[in-house]
Image (cartoon, rainbow, N blue to C red):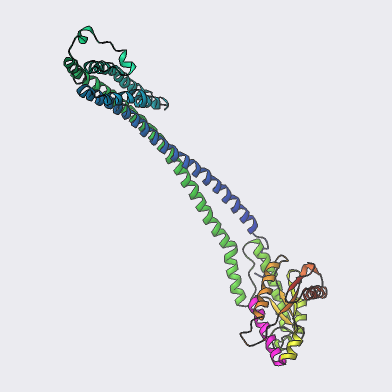
């Protein structure tokens, strides 16, 4: 099938690229949203665990506070030393760990059952304190102490106990905080506390299970979205490879074989292939009428003026840059170093040009030190690329490691979009070149800029 017979329409890479971008944005948004929810679920799970640990610690805090009160009242009953009494009331009236434990659990939703058991423990502990107050009052009377907390001053000893001797009061006080009745109440406190902890553990387990299930759902959603994104990426790569990479590789092989490019793949590539094939056919026809010797400069090996004229008539100037330049002060170089050195500088210039432009671009020597480079298949937005090439060329021309004097070039650049006719394009590039020389040489200027 000839190039004219092949279908000219194909899928647009621009459309495919747009769809891929939109899909990537949507999937990325979903991943961001899902990971946010995943983080929130994980944070909630951590929060639940921390809350349950705090509540469990609060429950044990009540028991620790109760044991601390017991320890100090028992020591006071045995020794009568006032610092044990002070420690007791500092805990009961200042630290108030038992009351704080109740308040902490009251603030937590869903801990009603555990709170009730803890409150039962607190009530028993408060009831036990009445027994402890009475025992402490006995010790204070036995020791003859007159300065003690107001709360103990409100405790009234029975007439029978009041009549006891100091030693008997001490023994009675010790019995009240060490007998079976006292420890029975302590056991009741522990039992209520353990029931509270059991309720907390059940509530914690229920919340953990709920939070974990939600977390697992969020993880599953993220996995699904990642799988969809992965499949989309693979599909995008395969589609891009089929419509652009494979046609390009085939085109490269055909170019190496010096033949036409098959017009397959995406719509944009088919357009490029058609344009190339058209230019290729014109180029081939032109080469049949022009021998190398007739179209190339003998000294430098690039196109001469005749080759320039042929290229101007065959190239698609609408997509071509014309880069016109000459070597600054070349006559002075010839006069100073001789024409042989001047010829070597021309050859060096051509070598540098070939290294900095593509093999598809055309280099022409149209005068003694005047050159034209046709930068083909180039849009008129490649100014930075051209400017960087010219700067690099001037830098390499200024190097003197090869024994040749440093030189520079002044450049004028015009695009086919600037002029419809080749002659007008040349004049545009020529004006730009002389503008660059007026700027001080060793520089460049774009036509119209």
What segment carries the magenta color? 337-356
Residue 4 visible here: no
Q: Pinpoint residue 317: horizontal percent, then vertical percent.
A: 76, 72
In the displayed structure, 388 sits above or below 399; it is above
Q: Within the image, what quadrant is residue 434 found in?
A: bottom right
Question: Where is 40 relative to 298, above or below?
Answer: above
Q: Name the residue located 58 percent from the left edge and 60 percent from the top edge.
A: 240
Front residue of 94/314: it is 94
Identity of the residue drawn at 61% across and 71% down: 251
In the rendered image of this protein, does residue 387 appear above or below residue 229? Answer: below
The quarter of the picture where the N terminus appears is bottom right
Magenta stretch, main secondary structure class? helix
* Residue 80 locus on image (x, y percent): 22, 22
In percent of width and height, residue 175 lies at 18, 18
Whether residue 250 can be seen here: yes
Quadrant of residue 324 in the image?
bottom right
38 with respect to 442 (left or right): left
Is residue 4 positioned above or below 39 on the image? below
């Amino acid at each position: 099938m000839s190039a004219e017979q092949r279908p000219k329409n194909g899928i647009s890479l621009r459309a495919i690229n747009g769809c891929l971008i939109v899909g990537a944005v949507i999937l990325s948004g979903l991943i961001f949203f899902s990971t946010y929810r995943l983080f929130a679920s994980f944070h909630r799970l951590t929060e639940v665990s921390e809350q349950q640990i705090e509540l469990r610690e609060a429950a044990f805090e009540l028991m620790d506070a109760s044991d601390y009160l017991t320890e100090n009242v028992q020591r006071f009953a045995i020794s009568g030393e006032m610092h044990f009494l002070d420690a007791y009331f500092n805990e009961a009236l200042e630290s108030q760990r038992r009351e704080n434990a109740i308040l902490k659990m009251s603030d937590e939703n869903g801990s009603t059952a555990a709170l009730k058991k803890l409150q039962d423990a607190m009530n028993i502990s408060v009831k036990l304190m009445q027994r402890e107050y009475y025992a402490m009052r006995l010790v204070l009377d036995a020791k003859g102490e007159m300065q003690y907390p107001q709360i103990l001053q409100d405790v009234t000893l029975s007439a029978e106990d009041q009549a006891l001797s100091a030693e008997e009061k001490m023994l009675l006080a010790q019995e009240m905080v060490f007998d079976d009745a006292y420890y029975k109440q302590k056991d009741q406190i522990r039992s209520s506390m353990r029931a509270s902890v059991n309720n907390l553990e059940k509530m914690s387990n229920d919340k953990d299970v709920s939070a974990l299930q939600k977390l697992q759902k969020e993880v599953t959603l993220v996995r699904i979205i990642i799988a969809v994104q992965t499949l989309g990426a693979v599909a995008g790569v395969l589609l891009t490879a089929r419509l652009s990479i494979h046609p390009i590789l085939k085109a490269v092989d055909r170019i190496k074989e010096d033949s036409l490019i098959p017009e397959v793949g995406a719509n944009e590539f088919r357009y490029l292939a058609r344009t190339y094939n058209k230019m290729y056919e014109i180029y081939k026809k032109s080469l049949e009428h022009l021998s190398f010797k007739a179209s190339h400069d003998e000294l430098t090996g690039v196109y001469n003026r005749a080759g320039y004229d042929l290229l101007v008539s065959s190239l698609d100037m609408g997509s071509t840059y014309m880069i016109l330049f000459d070597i600054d002060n070349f006559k002075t170089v010839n006069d100073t170093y001789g024409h042989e050195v001047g010829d070597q500088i021309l050859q060096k210039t051509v070598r540098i040009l070939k290294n900095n432009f593509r093999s598809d671009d055309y280099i022409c020597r149209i005068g003694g030190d005047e050159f034209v480079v046709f930068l083909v298949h180039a849009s008129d937005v490649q100014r930075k690329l051209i400017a960087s090439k010219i700067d690099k060329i001037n830098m390499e021309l200024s190097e003197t490691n090869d024994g040749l004097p440093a030189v520079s070039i002044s450049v004028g650049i015009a695009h086919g979009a600037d002029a419809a006719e080749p002659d007008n394009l040349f004049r545009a590039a020529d004006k730009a070149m002389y503008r660059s020389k007026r700027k001080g040489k060793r520089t460049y200027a774009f036509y119209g800029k």
